[in-house]
Structure formats: structure tokens, C-alpha cells
Amino acid sequence: MPRILIVGGGYAGFYTARKLEKYLRKNEAEVTMIDPLPYMTYQPFLPEVAAGSIEPRHAVVSHR
């Protein structure tokens, strides 16, 4: 089985991993993403968090 390694869990890495999991059949390839953090900060929401419009938890997405 082919193995795909995605280095970095930022916006591009996170969504690449999610899309690959959608498009690949089960056991077609093993997709692994590595990142030092267990979450991704969705940066477009940071101004709203700083302004108090939304809670900080809404600007964070778990990698798991």
C-alpha cells in the first residue's frame, strides 16, 4: 500500500489530508500528517477573536 506523508498541519496540509481521505478508497493509501501541534489555528478568524466577536475555541480545529 502506498504511503503519503504530509509535513505540516496548517491550512494546506490539513485540508489536503482531509481531501485525500475522502477521495481515496479504504486501504488504497495510508495518509499521515505530522505537525508539532495537535490543532490548527484558523487564522481568518483571529481578528474576530481579538475583537471579542467569537470565542477563541471557534478559531481552532483539532487535527484528529
Image: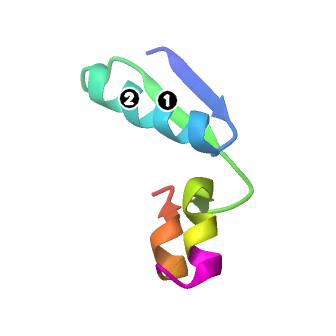
Whether the residues at callouts 1 and 2 have beta carbons within 8 Å, the answer is: yes
Q: Which residue is at a point 41% across and 20% down the rendered structure image?
A: 29
What amino acid does circle 1 point to?
Thr
Number of numbered discs overlaid on the protein picture: 2
Where in the figure is residue 3, as x and y percent of width and height? 53, 21
Q: Which residue is at a point 55% across and 85% down the rendered structure image?
A: 52
**Residue 9 lies in the magenta-colored region:** no
In front of the other: 49 or 42:
49
| Residue lying furthest right | 36
How would you rate the neighbour count of disc 1 (Cα within 10 Å): few for under 14, some for 14-19, many for 20 or more? some
In front of the other: 13 or 58:
58
Left or right: 42 with respect to 30?
right
Kind of element beneath mark 1:
helix
**Which label number is shown at residue 19?**
2
Left or right: 43 with respect to 64?
right
Span highlighted in magenta in the image = 49-54
Q: Which residue is mark 1?
A: 16
User: Which quarter of the figure is the C terminus placed in?
Assistant: bottom left
What amino acid does circle 2 point to?
Lys
In front of the other: 43 or 24:
43
